[in-house]
Amino acid sequence: MSLTERGLSPQNRSRIMTGLRFLLKVTMRRHDLSAEIYHIKEPQKIPHIMSAEEVKRLLAMAGNIQVRTLLSTGYGSGMRVGEVVKLNVKPIDSSLDIIRVAEPLWAERVVTGEVSLLKKGSLASSANWEASHR
């Protein structure tokens, strides 16, 4: 029974083939046979892209305008969940339509998106709140 017929994933098949290649090449010194064993490429996974209808349903399920704004900003700019949760007003440059996202070790990356949404949404109101509570 072959490895594929046994239902093994490409990662497991590749691991087994690497071990077999090591056995033939190093332990048994059969370079002629080890050359016949090849690496199995894992198929590339395509990310799921939501349709316009799915995005509308997701935003409709959001409880309030703040959650809706964060969801639309995160999805529109491609930000990670942790970045959206930590997002505040300071790194948003609405004149350039960019958001500066802090990376570990004092680095930053710049994401673009519909920053004009933030002017209308909850982050603009939270900016007013932050300014009034300093």
Image (cartoon, rainbow, N blue to C red):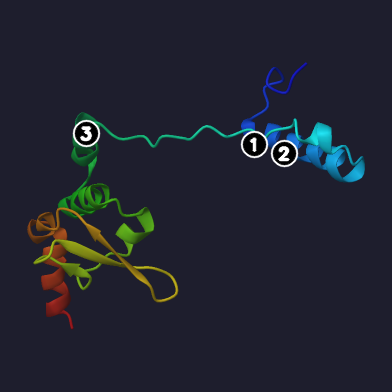
Amino acid at dot 3: Arg
Instruction: Please state which of residues 27 and 49 is positioned toward the viewer in this rendering.
Output: 27
Badge 1 is on which residue? 11
Kindly give the residue lying farthest to the right in the view shown: 28
Instruction: Estimate how packed mark 1 is, as few (under 14), some (14 to 19) or many (20 or more) residues with alpha carbons within 10 Å.
Output: few
Where is residue 31 drawn, in percent x and y? Answer: 83, 38
What residue sits 28% from the left and 34% below the top? 50
Residue at mark 1 to residue at mark 2: CA–CA distance: 6 Å
Classify mark 1: helix, strand or loop.
helix
Badge 2 is on which residue? 15
Mark 2 or mark 3, which is nearer the start of the sequence? Answer: 2
Answer above or below: position of 14 versus 111.
Answer: above
Where, by quadrant of the figure, is residue 100 drawn? bottom left
Q: Mark 1 or mark 3: which is in front? A: 1
Q: Are marks 1 and 3 in contact (CB under 8 Å)?
A: no
Instruction: Please state which of residues 95 and 59 is positioned toward the viewer in this rendering.
Output: 95
Q: Are marks 1 and 2 in contact (CB under 8 Å)?
A: yes
Where, by quadrant of the figure, is residue 121 drawn? bottom left
What residue sits 91% from the left and 44% below the top? 27
Left or right: where does residue 40 sit relative to residue 51? right
What residue sits 14% from the left and 70% below the top? 127
Residue at mark 1 to residue at mark 3: CA–CA distance: 36 Å
Instruction: Estimate how packed mark 2 is, as few (under 14), some (14 to 19) or many (20 or more) residues with alpha carbons within 10 Å.
Output: some
Amino acid at dot 1: Gln
Residue 57 numbered tag:
3
Where, by quadrant of the figure, is residue 82 drawn? bottom left
